[in-house]
Image: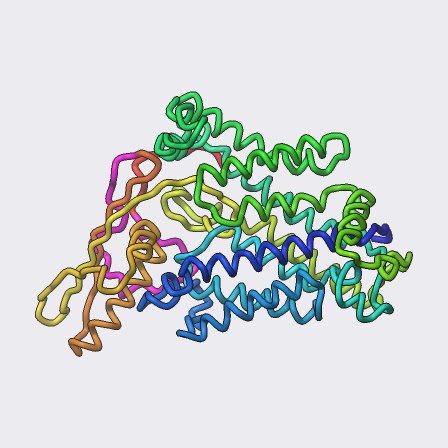
Amino acid sequence: MSRKSEAAPLAVFRVLFGLMMVWSVIRFWYNGWIQKLYLAPTFHFNYYGFEWVQPIGLWTYLLFVLCGLSALAVTLGYHYRIAIVVFFLSFTYIELMDKTTYLNHYYFVSLVSFLMIFLPAHVYFSLDAKRNPDRACQYIPQWTIDVIKLMLCIVYFYAGLAKLNSDWLLDAMPLKIWLPSKYDIPIIGGLLQYTWTHYAFSWGGALYDLSIPFLMLFRRTRGVGFAMIVGFHLLTRVLFPIGMFPYLMIASALIFFDSTRLHCAVTRVSHWLRIDMSQFDNHRYYQESTISIQKAKIALFSVFFVLQLLLPFRYLMYPGELFWTQEGFRFSWRVMLVESAGSAMFKVVDLQSGKRFYVDNANFLTPFQEKQMAFQPDFILEYAHRLEAYYEEIEGKELAVYVDCFVAMNGRLSQRYIDPQVDLTKIEESFRHKDWILPMKDEIEGL
């Protein structure tokens, strides 16, 4: 804990992370996704326990402005502590408004921005340090850099572990479905039609994720590891619409590099920008104001990383096939492992008269929401309760809601997904196993 390092790696990470987030907010606004994802839908799917996080209408634009400006302030290191707290809260609130938009890299951004609240990322190459020379420090504790490295290692390694299953390794699924559709990509489009290519991508992807943490941690292999990161993420950017994730991971990987080398890079950039570095390169060492604060941070990070190590394995507490039941799937770094498609027809029954009718989902959900709802059980349950509330208010009668749902996963034939005899209005969302999900008629071996 007493080891110290140049502050440059954390400052570089802060600048690049902030720039990525500014770009992300602008991209969201420019493409009209604020309107499409948060304003247009009349119904939003909530995370269990966060039902109180609701869209705020046109104020959502202000929320994005707040998120973008705070990201810019993080980039510049301007009122950093306030900026990173505001960014974490605003970004996380946006992501919690509708779980239809869940992506692993959004989760990653929330976790990293939470960590950054407690890191001295503003004491070097920042406006805060420039405005207040007493705050400027050239050196910081090594562990404040290592926590970011550890977070990145967890993401890669757990993504690799998740690929050690029979669908991915033995059947090359779902890449065997996705890659042939990329036939029009110049140069490599033809190669993507071959079965051996699908297996090469599957095995290569698993080995890549599992090896990156070790390649990046050691000086001799770091160059190879970084070249693999750049190549892999640029290739995935060409193949799949995964937004900012490739660039974010490439930029983040720089934190593994030697602090002296990053210090030289910052010095070179400051020369181009005509920034006087003498105020930052002052040989001062950053320390917490009191030992108790340092101990509190260490305790907080310890709990945080224990949770991060255990949370992906919570699926072991549930029976059934993880990819099928989806219980414990989110927040576990299972990246692009499943191709599912489903259809869900909801039946509303008047319990007094026995009269019934079927629901047109398009009256309540956007096409994107309907697609996601049709193969995720917690979405189906929440939507059923929504239908119950809506129609009971109109009919003034006690109603039951049933679903006739079929799902096809990773190239398998479609099969019934939910027990059609179960009245979903009688079931409350919880962390308990959803025994109304019918078993998958197949097995997937592996982790």
- x, y (%) of residue 239? 45, 37
Q: Is residue 425 magenta?
A: yes
How many labels, in total?
0
Q: Main secondary structure of the magenta part?
A: loop
Q: Is residue 418 above or below residue 338?
A: below
Q: Please state if 218 lies on the left or on the right of 382 as rendered.
A: right
- The image quadrant that residue 434 belongs to is bottom left
Q: Could you tell me which residue is drawn at 23 percent across and 61 percent down? A: 423
- x, y (%) of residue 55? 41, 71
- x, y (%) of residue 234? 54, 38
What span is colored magenta in the figure?
412-437
- The image quadrant that residue 220 belongs to is top right
Q: Please state if 127 lies on the left or on the right of 175 as rendered.
A: right
- x, y (%) of residue 259? 80, 46
Q: Is residue 271 above or below residue 239?
A: below
- The image quadrant that residue 66 belongs to is bottom right
Between 227 and 404, the one lying in front of the other is: 227
Q: Which residue is at the far right?
A: 283
Between 365 and 348, the one lying in front of the other is: 365
Q: Please state if 136 lies on the left or on the right of 398 as rendered.
A: right
Between 200 and 312, the one lying in front of the other is: 200
Q: Please state if 69 lies on the left or on the right of 127 as rendered.
A: left
Q: Could you tell me which residue is drawn at 50 percent across and 71 percent down? A: 63
